[in-house]
Amino acid sequence: MPDYDDNYVSGCHGTVAEQLDEAYYDDRSDADDDMEKGRIKFPKNKLYGRDKELGVLRQLYGAMATNNSDERADDGAAREGTRISFAGSSPSNIDSRVVFLSGYSGVGKSALVAEFINQIQQEYNNSAANDGSSPVLHFSGKYTQQSSGAAPFSAVSEVFGNIVSSLVNGQQRSEEEKKYTRSLCTKIWKKIQSSGVIGPDTDGNEVLIEIFPLLRPLLDGSFANNKKLQRMESMSNVEDREKKGEPTMNAVKESTSELLTLIASSLQRPLILFLDDLQWADGPSMELLLFLLANAQMKNLMFICAYRSNEVGVDHPFADIMTKVTESRGEFVAKVDLFSLSQEAISQFIADCIGMEEVDSVKELVEVIYPKTMGNIFCVMQAIEELVRKNALYYDVMCFEWRWTVDKVELANQVGADVVETVKSKIKGLSVNIQNILAVMAYIPFSVDVSVLKELLLTDDALNENEIASLLKEASDEGMLIFLAESGHYVLAHDRIREASRGYLGGKEDHDQLLLHMADVLQRLGKGSKMEWCLYTAVDLLNSLPSDKVNVTDLIKLNLRVSKIAKRRGSPGKENSLLRECLERLQPFKWKDYDLSLEVYDAVIVSEYTLGNQDRATIAIEEVLDHAKCLGDKVSAFLHRVKSLCETKDYAMAAHEGVKILNMFSYNIPLKPTKLDLVREKMKLRLAFKGRSYASLTNLPVVDDPLTELFSEVGRDCLFSGQTRLVVVIAWTAVRRAIEKGIDRCFSLCLVMLGTLLGKKGNVRAANEIGNVALTISENFRNNKSDYSYTQFGSYAGIIFYLQPFRSGVDVLQQCYKDLKFSGKFDFALGSMLNYFYAYFAAGLNLGSILESKLLVLDEFSQSVDRGGFAATFQIHRQFVINLRQRSEQPTLMNGPAFQQERALSEMNDQASKMALRDASIFRLELAFIFNDIECMAAMLETLAAYPFEDQVISRFHIRACFMGLAAFSLNERNTVMGNKCLKYFRRMKKLGSTNAPPAYFFIAALKRPTKKAFIAAIDSCTEASMPHLEAMARERYAMFLLTRNELELANSHITSAYWLYYDWGAHGKSFSLEREYPFVKAAKRTKAGSHVSSGTATKHTSVNGSVIESQKVVKRKGTFEYNSTLSRRELVKS
């Protein structure tokens, strides 16, 4: 073992000699404390030179907890070396606060936070008896430099583990605290139960338990039922969980945010979360942290994020997080920079360490220590201890005080310049057992309990747990370890101690032997979700060893196993690094072990493609295609070759390559199908069905068929490249394969594509049958929320709405949005909500303020994920709603708080501008019809005529065709060509059985040939379909028709009915317009609110002069919906 300190004398602790009886010298009562008088005791619970920074933290917390100016600490004058950048004071006492705390290693960041928490705890202790408030809850987590050996989200996991230890496991000191935490746990559990995000049996609940296993007692309520916990834990082995799909990052974000929100909202005082050493945080943690810190919806939380300023440059991911959070949260963000302490603060610290009352008396020591440590408090402490070890600073038992006899030059020679070497010198003076403990703990990124440490130690003499606990306490007394009350474990006191402990090991053989032993133990212990960290550390230790020291095959398998865990734990980056390690170890004998090589390369292909590393993915793809023994082993490589081509947006090329690949499996799909080819393929399909219908597909067995995903991918590429015939052929071929092999999770996606195309070509009944079959089959794969929700979304948006009511799908589409967003499929999620709003508007559902809020939230979310096209459409929708709900002099213009058409279109590229103009024109056309703006109707008809008539979004096309038809026959110079085209479409859909088409058909027909009978048919149809918006318009147009025939009383009755229908719909702006045009409606009252006429006249109303206008019986049809304005909802009318 190297000799780090020639001046060290074994058995001495800075004393001249051991004094056995201090009473010989004086009669002090603590005479038995002789040896302790020879040890440096650093001051505890005292912070030096940080009053300004402490004031900032207190001010932020005080603004949240009490919003009382008396709570704020006096700013005072800034001390030397301190700079504070504060973004602004808080105007609210509930919004979360964020503190970015920077400083060099050892400068005292953790000590500052500890003192801040200590002070507010003391204030609580002093005031709790008076105000009955709840305790201050604070939890911390720390990242480690050994990030490669840590599980993803390690510090966040530590925070949650501490929360469970504190709240669930009852680590409280008094019965009063236990009573409070039991009550708090129950309160949190009730909120979790009612949460739609992380409640029992939700995906969010499963995600949190998967990512943060220690949360299980809190999330499943088993803190009140230990048997339930034991039952569930017995099922939670690694092998079973590896079969589940991996959660997406967005699922982790939303679930974590929801849990923290529920916990914080249960507290009277703000929850404090301290995350340290964020410069070492893993990628998933960074992404999660950005989401949490920038989330303005989080309340009653104070985040303190500490990092080393010298290790976070402008290109560091955490620097980007700080910039984005500061931009989004502004006044709720504070930045505190800690610099080295001033010489005055260090002087006071040294004086307190050695019991000197006068600071000037330590001037010589300060002049030696300060230049060497530059005021870094950790380095100062190590320097003082080094002087004690070398007897340059000693405790004089004759005078009972600390002294030094050498001059300043000699003192300076005794203080080392390298703090790590100084710590190594200190470690040498400790017992061999403590040295071994420190060496083991240096390779463990987390705190561990004594039982685990006992297994990991490689010693000649086995130590029992009591002995290890005693050694840990001794190491803590020496300042090498810190005891964490939250977890009940010891951790290394500083990263420099970790570095020194590793470097203190003996020769290379001793080092390798220890790592092999630790890895073997950790693999044995790494069973169950709570101990998965053992596998991360084990594989990291083994990966650090050369190949001649390990069993390479076993190491590759371990890397594969842990990579799957990392993927399931939401860390694709960690998964990727482990797979690259597999590849590197595999190179000397790749493909000699065929199965292992194929497994590694297939995993690498998926990982590299997912992370966007197309070049690496391509290399792995070619490797598999060159060496795989059969076509079945090449499916994954084929699939990702096609997907890689899609990334170039050359869908035609991708489709061409995909068809070539499918033909390798003997399918003979023509690259450019002719009509004759379609006939042949259809005949093959009929033969495969053997007279059965598409419904028979629901009875097929469920199988895992990777080739089905390739069919789905190639079909999508054909669809995007406009090769519709080829899509049909591919979908039919997929159906034939399913009949032969069984149905895979991707099969329903093939059916959705087929049904969508058949619907566009006019074969609506067949499309509807296929859509319903796709929905039924998708129920087999409900656990795969991504594919299941995409099938639901695609079926309703492109197929089901042809025949079934729009209102039947709005809730489905909203749930699809939630599930797809949770799965990280943002484009599909936003597409679901786009169709939700089109269906909502087409159905004439209520235009309440909640709808505006939804649209605003979606607008903001679209922009946050850089989906400007979706954002523009949601803005158009919101402006449409605003124009209907509010008074406006120009209600047909898209020029308001949500959307300003001219400016917005000028900022878009040509394609985006074209699509936005189409969407804006559709809604302007509807507004123009509602407000009877003839000029605007003509202009919008001209604009929309330039676009293709058919639209794959059924609900959007329904709105467009409906109002193009209505407007065409409302103009002074009728556009009969366009009107008849729209009328023909709705006539065909009505004959096919569409429930949405009749109101539009009869209404357009009434405007084409206005008669009483035609208008009554339109009004009845709108009432039966529960479309109050169209009914209001039909009644208004009927009234206008009646006025031309001088039937004033009946016209007024219908105007009044239209007025209330508009009002009930939420189109208050239109109601106000009618009040101006027909003043009598303001005084009209409904004798039966919300009842609608169904056969030609209005509900009984009282006119301005009090006379009763015509009243007719309201016919209520069995099983239809009727609008109740009093309750503001649709009700099912029963006969």
Image (tube, rainbow, N blue to C red):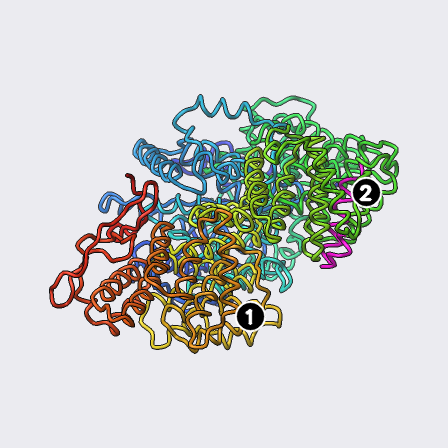
Pick the residue in front: 912 or 53: 912
From this view, report whether residue 1065 is shown above or below residue 1043.
Answer: above
In the image, 1085: left or right of 1073? left
Pick the residue in front: 889 or 453: 889
Q: Earlier in the sequence, mark 2 or mark 1?
A: 2
Quarter residue 896 falls in: bottom left
Give coordinates of residue 1122: x percent, y percent: 31, 48
Q: In which quarter of the image is the N terminus?
A: top right
From this view, report whether residue 807 is shown above or below residue 30.
Answer: below
**In this figure, which residue is indicated by the disc labeled 1?**
945
Under tag 2, what secondary structure?
loop
Under tag 1, what secondary structure?
loop
**In this figure, which residue is indicated by the disc labeled 2?**
668
Quarter residue 594 falls in: top right
The three-letter code of the residue at mark 1 reads Ala
User: Which segment is the magenta one?
Assistant: 633-655
Residue 457 in view? yes
From this view, report whether residue 998 is shown above or below residue 157.
Answer: below
The residue at 39%/75% (across/down) is: 933
The three-letter code of the residue at mark 2 reads Asn
